Structures are given as C-alpha cells and as structure tokens.
C-alpha cells in the first residue's frame, strides 16, 4: 500500500498504533478481489460495541467494527466493496482483530 511517510506519521499521531490490513476473496464468478487498507488498534470500547451488536446481527457487528477501525483510505468505498461478502470481512475480524484481545485461547477448569 502506498502512503506518504508524512501522512502515515499523522495517522500514527492521531490513532496510535497503525496496521496494514488486506482482504482477498473470490466472488461467485471466481473473480479475485483484493482490498488493502490501514487500520488502528482496536480498543476495549470497540469490542464492547461489537459484542452488543453481535447479539442481534453478527454480520453487521463485524462490518461495523471493520468500518470503525479503517483509517486509510476512507472506509466507505472499502465497505461497499466487501459488504456482500460477510465471510471475507468476518475472517478478517477473526484472524486480525480478535488476537488483540487474546487469540487462540485455551482454558482449563476442574473441580477439586
């Protein structure tokens, strides 16, 4: 992804940690679509909002979360391109966003 160094520095100052993200998927015609963007580190408030909306619609929750995190380019066109492919943006949320809050979690509990 091409972005001017100065613009990247401005994004870092405004949002803290910035990450490069990409979603590649094929559509019903087997055409490849590739989206690249920069996103900010999610906050606990982002995850709380996601969890609240997830109770009603997990697909909308994932799309809203992705839209709220994209900082470059404008999220609108990216969301429009991926909106009809919930598996694509859902996978991004699962693989790229969830690890910020504890990925590959394994727990144990037993009565003693």
Image (cartoon, rainbow, N blue to C red):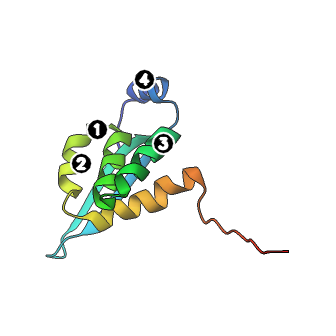
Q: Specify few, some or many for label 2: CA neighbours under 10 Å numbering under 14, 14-19, or 20 or more.
A: some
Could you say where residue 112 lies in the image, as x and y percent from the top left?
86, 74
**SS at circle 1:** loop
Q: Judge by depth and name the residue closer to the eye, 56 or 100.
A: 56
Going from the N terminus, do you reach mark 2 or mark 1 first?
1
Q: Nearer the viewer, mark 1 or mark 3?
A: 3
| Disc marking residue 73 | 1
Cβ atoms under marks 2 and 1 closer than 8 Å: yes
Instruction: Quickly name the residue at label 2.
Output: 78
| Disc marking residue 10 | 4
Q: Specify few, some or many for label 4: CA neighbours under 10 Å numbering under 14, 14-19, or 20 or more.
A: few
Res 43 visible: no
Q: Nearer the viewer, mark 2 or mark 3?
A: 3
Instruction: Quickly name the residue at label 3.
Output: 42
Q: Specify few, some or many for label 3: CA neighbours under 10 Å numbering under 14, 14-19, or 20 or more.
A: some
User: Which residue, as the protein is rendered here, is positioned at the far left?
Assistant: 29
């Amino acid at each position: 992804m091409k972005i001017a160094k100065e613009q990247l520095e401005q994004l870092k100052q405004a949002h803290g940690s910035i990450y490069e993200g990409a979603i590649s998927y094929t559509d019903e015609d087997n055409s490849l679509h590739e989206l690249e963007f920069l996103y900010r580190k999610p906050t606990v408030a982002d995850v709380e909002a996601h969890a609240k909306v997830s109770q009603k619609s997990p697909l909308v929750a994932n799309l809203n979360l992705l839209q709220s995190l994209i900082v470059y380019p404008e999220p609108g066109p990216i969301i429009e391109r991926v909106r009809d492919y919930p598996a694509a943006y859902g996978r991004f949320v699962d693989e790229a966003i969830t690890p910020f809050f504890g990925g590959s979690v394994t727990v144990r509990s037993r009565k003693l």
